[in-house]
Image (cartoon, helix red, strand yellow):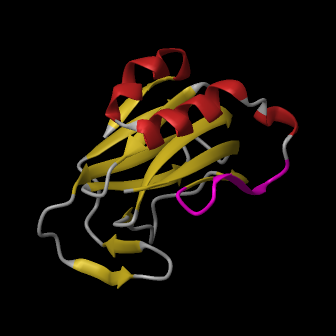
Amino acid sequence: MIIDDLQNADNYKILGDRLAKGLSYLQKTDFTSLAAGKYEIEGDKIFAIISEYNTIDTDNEKMEAHKKYIDIQYWVSGAEKVGHDILKNQPLFQEYDTEKDFLLVGNFPSYFSVMQAGMFAIYFPWDLHMPCIKIDGAAAVKKVVIKVSV
């Protein structure tokens, strides 16, 4: 897992061409006026999903991980907490769903990070994450998730 500010994104382009392309897309795109939805970057190998939502409690939430895609999550506006942990041999709440590319772990995260507008996080297949968690009260968030195939 990597957490940083978008102004430092060039430092991570050495991690591969696809990650570099996803980070460049974040750097070059004005997301403030783009509507929620899916945006193709490189077919099904790299694409963006823009979402707008209100943050929620941790009640009944589960950590997720992916196998086919790396997530680059970028916060356009608002702030939220994200729970995270390393995928080890935790008991699964939901087995891996090949169509939706995720599994769920019922354990509570060991760590939380506060993510704010302008920040990004890269979640690799071994990184569990629980996004969308409110900090003090529910707040509006606009976020871009770049899906990068492994």
The residue lying at 64 percent from left, 34 percent from top is 25
* Residue 50 position (above or below residue 99): above
Q: Where is residue 145 in the image (x, y as percent from the top left)?
A: 58, 49
| Image: magenta residue range | 35-45
The residue lying at 41 percent from left, 72 percent from top is 102
Give the image quarter of residue 44. bottom right
- Name the residue nearer the viewer: 20 or 74: 20
Q: Quadrant of the N terminus?
A: top left
The residue lying at 78 percent from left, 29 percent from top is 30
Which residue in the rendered view is the most extreme toward the left?
89
Q: Where is residue 117 in the image (x, y as percent from the top left)?
A: 63, 28
Specify whether residue 75 is in view: yes
* Residue 44 position (above or below residue 50): below
Q: Is residue 15 left or right of residue 57?
A: left
- Name the residue nearer the viewer: 81 or 40: 40
- Name the residue nearer the viewer: 4 or 137: 4
Specify whether residue 79 is in view: no
Give the image quarter of residue 61. bottom left
Q: Is residue 84 left or right of residue 114?
A: left
Q: Where is residue 14 in the image (x, y as percent from the top left)?
A: 34, 27
Which residue in the rendered view is the most extreme toward the top?
7
The residue lying at 46 percent from left, 33 percent from top is 114
Residue 43, magenta (yes or no): yes
* Residue 4 position (above or below residue 56): above
